[in-house]
Image: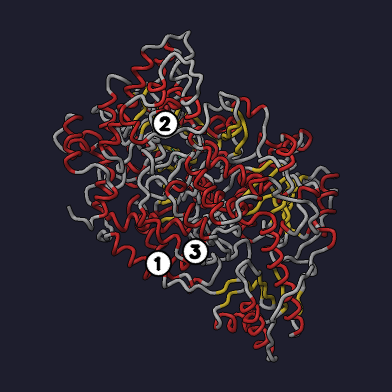
Amino acid sequence: MDTADFSLRHIGPREAQQQAMLKTIGVDSLEQLIYETVPDDIRLKKDLDLDEPMSEQDYLLHISKLSKKNKVFSTYIGLGYHPTILPAVIQRNVLENPGWYTAYTPYQAEIAQGRLEALLNFQTMITDLTGMELANASLLDESTAAAEAMGLLYAVRDREQKKNKINKFFVSEAILPQTLSVLKTRANPLDIELVVGNEADFDFSENFFGAILQYPGKHGQVTNIKPFIEKANAANIKVAVSADIMSLIKLEAPGKFGADVVVGTTQRFGVPMGYGGPHAAFFATKDAYKRDLPGRIIGVTKDANGNRALRMALQTREQHIKRDKATSNICTAQVLLAVMASMYAVYHGPDGLRHIANKIHNKTAALSKALSKLGYEQSNTSFFDTLQLKANAKAIKVAAESKKVNFYYPSEDTVVLSLNETTNLKDLNRIISIFAGVAQKDSFKISEVSEANAIDQNLQRQTDFLTGPVFNTYHSETQLMRYIKRLERKDLALNHSMIPLGSCTMKLNAAAEMLPLSWFQWGSIHPYVPVEQAKGYHKVLRKLEDQLTEITGFAGTSLQPNSGAQGEFAGLMVIKAYHESRDDHHRNICIIPSSAHGTNPASAVMAGMKVVVTKSSDDGNIDVEDLREKAEMHKDNLSALMITYPSTHGVYESAIKEITQIIHDNGGQVYMDGANMNAQVGLTNPGNIGADVCHLNLHKTFAIPHGGGGPGVGPICVAKQLVPFLPSNPLIKTGGDNAITAISAAPFGSSLVCLISYGYIKMLGARGLKRSTEVAILNANYIKKRLQGAFETLYSGERGRAAHEMIIDCRPFKAHGIEVVDIAKRLMDYGFHSPTVSFPVAGTMMIEPTESEDQAEMDRFCDAMISIKKEIETLSKEDDNNKLKNAPHTLDMITSDDWQLPYSRQEAAFPLEFVKENKFWPSVRRVDDAYGDRNLVCTCAPIEAYMEEA
Ligand SMILES: *Cc1c(COP(=O)(O)O)cnc(C)c1O
């Protein structure tokens, strides 16, 4: 064994295991299996053209060298991104801890109470600081959150407004430039008309459905938003506020003034800038709009014993149910980053946060005085952390960069600078000396900063925040370390056992891929620094783009979309721009198979398209004749087909080339949902099957960890004709020559975690990537074979093989009174996370082992499944007091002095021998979803509630 070969670490089964598994399946070789699985006419004829694979050791040296090409300056650019201090205890125990970063989205609440609690803390922090009733547990970035706010306000227009087609939305000119760009992208397909202006001149008698303000404004002025909101409310114009989280500690909460939505980012609560992301955005609103709130809400409910338990609330709003009626396509969010930001608030507590905000504010006020003394005009009359100076921008820039300092230069005679948590006296004096030098005056030094108050009287915060015990307890490192551990222990992640989630590809997230994320040369780069300071990033990002372009067989890639669903929207907008460039403005029909993921129709609607659903035949394939009929019927208006390949049914449809040809013949473009790319890499690719654009979920196929529900990266790769339209950014050049406006806030999306996928490809190389795909297929077919007889696999390819995942039918167990969720919950007693439940077929499970799981782990999983099947067989429909209905069993139940159940404690908690070795205890009994939705509580109680109880 070559110990330097990373593929041997990434891929689970050893050679001998692979041989044994092939034998079980009944094929002679891996080549034979792949031959029987992947249709011949779509196989690649040659290997991918990628660099030779690197060992982990070499890779870490390489990425360390590249990191030094990034120049870390003192950066005061602001615009929604600030240097921050990530407390080491959070870095080590959350960011660098697979117990947190390898967890899946908390669909299985009983084994996810830890991150659900951290997310409830996040929501509490947000509702307190914004003064709103309800907050979600994270959106992708501030700009897309602002766009979601616009979408929500549009969706909740009253009947009169809808009837009169009121479509005007006011955008304050103080909005961040990237937010304006994203708003434009999102407004256009919905026929929303954006009106940008100064809110002081706004005419409230005009017909607008909503408005958005920036608080403080992009250049730091804190305008009094209160009169605007009051007048807008009176005129039935709903108001969203895009707010800076740190300033809200000192500024009165917009909710107190009557805002309808408050959005922003929590980046500066301890999350590194990472050249633009990932960071958790927030979205807070009124209870009245809870059914339209995008993203995920964590809510309090009770378990089967009546004990308090948490789970994702109001899941009925999800795109899976709403499909083309959905108003948002958010699926993956930013859970890991939300957890980090919430822990920052838990660690510092309200007093610590006040201290930090005061420190920033006092220094800003002191700097304002000092610069005025030097003769500079500072034009913000009310400010928190940002100064706006009249100065020769060019001269200041030269002087500043020679001292390794970055400011923001919005015009030739304006310099804007934002201070932050890391700014110290030395930094202040360096700034003063830069300005003094340009003014040709003697510099002087500040040796002490006094209390100051430069905020408008009307806007100073009166409302208390974070009064609950969780924010007032864990302020020493020992306390916080144990709190984080206590939560971690409640959660099942990949460091406990396999998470066989169909469609979500929960593979290894290698430590060597993760290590560089903690390095300051990667973390401390602001997305708007001059590109010469980010050369390390540009090398990595460009190379990653090239690698993905090669892997997909396309001509260009944009890394900007920060989730798969964002990629879908981006890809469709690019298709739309392409059609429009050919004067095909009318092409707006998007054909989507009934088996598609719910984000597909949701994204199509957001892109202004009309969804036409095409059927699947009984064998699970697209009904080609139905598709042809629909494509021909709509040929004058056909825009696109969205298709997942291999299909969500887990098969490589052999008609795929015919399908893409039909669409092209009728004037459409083919969008391939790349969530199943783990079944293609190195064997075939989207370009080869005739697609024009695809997104990739780097957090599935390319090893970015799921983070408990995010971060994600959803780049789009496109064919030649679509390259010119790849998305841009208003401040940093990126995208095509004829680029659409921004899809997300940062020019290259969540750059920091792109390092993971870059490392993954670098260390595996063409051979390792292809091998990974092959072993993913081998593993899936091994499970299929092992479960044969106990469970029926719903669909297979022409030669009877599964792709990299398979669907097993659980509907026959209804005869025994058992639903698919009962199996999901019972698996917890065996120490496993359930496969995907009821997608894409209700009453089924979708199993995807990935290449990283070895035979022994898959055997344990299959043994558990077969054992559960045997348990089911003994049950009758009338009996609802059984091991499956009562699952999962908690330690509390098992050790109770009063055990009344008709089976033994051993059978309940240790149903198979191997469980004893590695028992995982669900921390609550089965949660009651419906109760929580009827009694929606989405924050942790303030301390008074606990006092009352006592
Ligand atoms: C995961 C997934 C998506 C959505 O991707 P996100 O990154 O969660 O936004 C879309 N389609 C399919 C088939 C998926 O599995």
Residue at the (57%, 74%) spot, across then down: 74
Give whichever of discs 1 and 3 has the lower sequence position.
3
Q: Amino acid at mark 2?
A: Ser
586 lies left or right of 758: right
Give whichever of discs 3 and 2 has the lower sequence position.
3
Name the residue furthest front.
897
Q: What colour scheme governs how the chains and residues are painted in the rendered image of this protein? A: secondary structure
**Occupied quadrant, residue 386:** bottom right
Q: Are the residues at dot 1 and dot 2 in contact (C-beta closer than 8 Å)?
A: no
Residue at the (69%, 49%) spot, across then down: 466
Rendered location of residue 212, percent (x, y): 72, 52
Q: Is residue 50 above or below residue 942?
A: below
Rendered location of residue 162, percent (x, y): 74, 36
Q: Are the residues at dot 1 and dot 3 in contact (C-beta closer than 8 Å)?
A: no
User: Is label 1 or label 2 in front?
Assistant: 2
Q: Amino acid at mark 1?
A: Lys
Q: Which residue is mark 3?
A: 523
Rendered location of residue 176, percent (x, y): 65, 60
Spatial CA span between label 3 and label 2: 35 Å
